[in-house]
Amino acid sequence: MAAANRPGWGQRLAALALLALLMAGVFYLLVDQALIARYRYYRTHLEQQQGRLEQLERMAASREPIQRLIAGIQQDRNAAAQYLPQSAPSLAAAELQQRVKTVVEAAGGTLRSTQALPPAEEGNAVKVTVSAAMTGDTESLQKILHALEAQTPLLFVDNLDVTARENRPRLASGRLASYSRIQLTVQFEVSGYLRKEGS
């Protein structure tokens, strides 16, 4: 009776074949999934590269008109008037300091200090920058900023730092006034551009 319950060689071989078939199916599915994942990765990467290629082709197509526009601007006499007229950065910085002093005093402010910063090359131009510190009220600050940025040649105000303090002015009698005024302490940088020689 025990011999009837024991599987024969045919059943064992069939079980082994079924197990081998099952393992081959699992292996195929794993390999298939890995290949599909790799295919998706490469397809996505290819689509991204094609998009980048189209973008670069559009940029290359627009390069020539932009170069013509730049050349036209460089030859425009009105554009040349927007540069500082001096030939050296040190001369331009000295002139810029004088211009800041004149503008601040004309607007009713008090210039505390000016300092020329090192020049910096930017493309076909040299950026000349002056740092300034002043005191005044809001009306004088508005006039100063407008006067500096509305001039020819072009000037740019950057790194503007304003601190406000309320104070009561002293009257001619020596007593403090009953009203108060806002006193501004302002630091800023003014920049202009020199054309590089040969530009």
Image (spheres, rainbow, N blue to C red):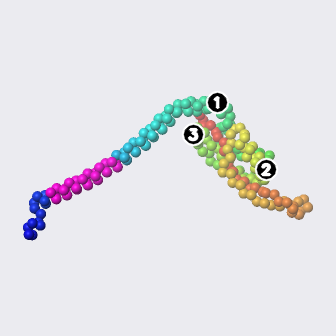
Q: CA distance from mark 2 to mark 1?
A: 36 Å
Q: Residue drawn 28% across and 52% down?
A: 29
Main secondary-structure element of the magenta-colored stretch: helix
Residue 116 visible in the current orientation: no
State the residue position of label 3: 123
Q: Residue furthest right?
A: 173
Callout 2 amino acid: Glu
Q: Which residue is mark 2?
A: 139
* Element marked by disc 1: loop
To which residue does mark 1 refer?
Answer: 76
Where is residue 161? Give x, y as percent: 69, 54
Residue at image x 22%, y 56%? 23
Q: Is residue 73 magenta?
A: no
User: Which region shows up in magenta?
Assistant: 14-38
Label 1 CA crowd tier, 10 Å (few <14, some 14–19, many 20+)? few
Residue 29 forms part of the magenta stretch: yes
Judge left or right: residue 25 versus residue 119: left
Where residue 60 sits: x, y (%)?
49, 34
Say which amino acid is labelled 3.
Gly
Q: Secondary structure at mark 2?
A: helix
**Mark carried by residue 154:** none
Q: Residue at x 37, y 46 (%)?
A: 40
Q: Quadrant of residue 46?
A: top left
